[in-house]
Amino acid sequence: MKHKLIPALGAAVLLVLSLAGCGQQSSQAEYIGIDAAKAIALEAAGVTESAASFSTAGLDRQNGMDFYAVDFTANGQSYAYNIDAVTGVIIDGGASTGGTQVSGLPNGTTGAQSETQVSPAPSDDTQTSPAGSGTTITEERAREIALADAGLTADEVTFVRSRLDYDDGRQRYDVEFYTADYAEYDYEIDASTGEVLSYDYDAEGYTAPAAGTSAITAEQAQQIALAEVPGASVSDIWEFEVDMDDGRLEYEGTIYYSGMEYEFTIDGYSGAIRSWDAESIYR
């Protein structure tokens, strides 16, 4: 009887190992990549890449599912697609008319066979190391990647920010810049692979400053804010950054002084305080 139990136990062990292998394989599913998602959306819409102007293309998640949200316009028509990040299947999408999406897609429509599909991006499982570990591209390289994707050069833009961030287990660079006509670009670049994770382009609602108007410096903006808090100094400014709002440069920051927290926004051209909020840190 003991000899008969050995094969049975061996089979059980093999079954467990087989199931574990399957589980490991499924957990390492690879993303198709943002370029492939764009190609799938274009193919479904029957639009060529040269005719399309993308406004949004990035990785998103809803109800535990990762997908690429791809929005673009072509020939005066707007299109929006949500594409499964692993399979390339179009979850929903189509042309938008008057705010109503018109899909017209058969069930199971997929662009997985698109000839322009690029190599899969690494899965999230390979990108969950703590910030600061592993090989990362430089900030300068992240800027170059964003500019190349936008079809611009460094001397054609003004950078608002480019910094290394950490989100959802992945290191990424947040790169934001604007052009001379105040079109704003915002990119998220994978810090390990250099892949464009998402980008946003906005050329609407921008008002250029009057001719001859020059921007104030960051130091000038800080002094304007500090003048509102007698006794405070630059060392009391704990948060400070440059931002763009509807095409206008602005400075945002936070001052901690004498038990109070002050949050401010200062216009980057006039130096006017656009918003000011003060409250006790002991509230």
Image (tube, grey):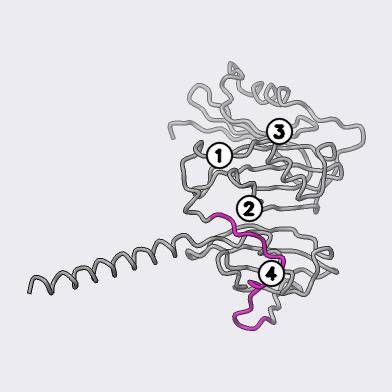
User: Which amino acid type corresponds to the residue marked 4 in the rendered image?
Assistant: Ile
Mark sitting on residue 239: none
Asked whether the residues under the numbered discs 2 and 4 touch, taking CB atoms below 8 Å apart as contact, a structural biologist would say: no
**Magenta span covers which residues?**
105-122
**35 is higher (above) or lower (below) than 96:** above
Q: CA distance from mark 3 to mark 4?
A: 43 Å
Q: What quarter of the picture does the C terminus occupy?
A: top left
User: Label 4: how many residues lie within 10 Å, few (<14), some (14-19) or many (20+)?
Assistant: many
Disc nearer the start of the sequence (2/4): 4
Mark 1 sits on what residue? Answer: 135
- The residue under label 2 is which amino acid type? Leu
The mark lying in front, picked from 3 and 1, is 1
Distance between the Cα atoms at labels 2 and 1? 17 Å
Q: Position of residue 215 (x, y in %)?
A: 81, 30
Asked whether residue 271 is drawn in magenta, I would say no
**Secondary structure under the numbered disc 2 in the rendered image:** strand
Q: SS class of the residue under badge 3?
A: strand
Q: Secondary structure at mark 1?
A: loop
For marks 2 and 3, the one nearer the N-term is 2
Circle nearer the N terminus (3, 4): 4
Give the residue at mark 2. 197
Magenta: predominant secondary structure element? loop
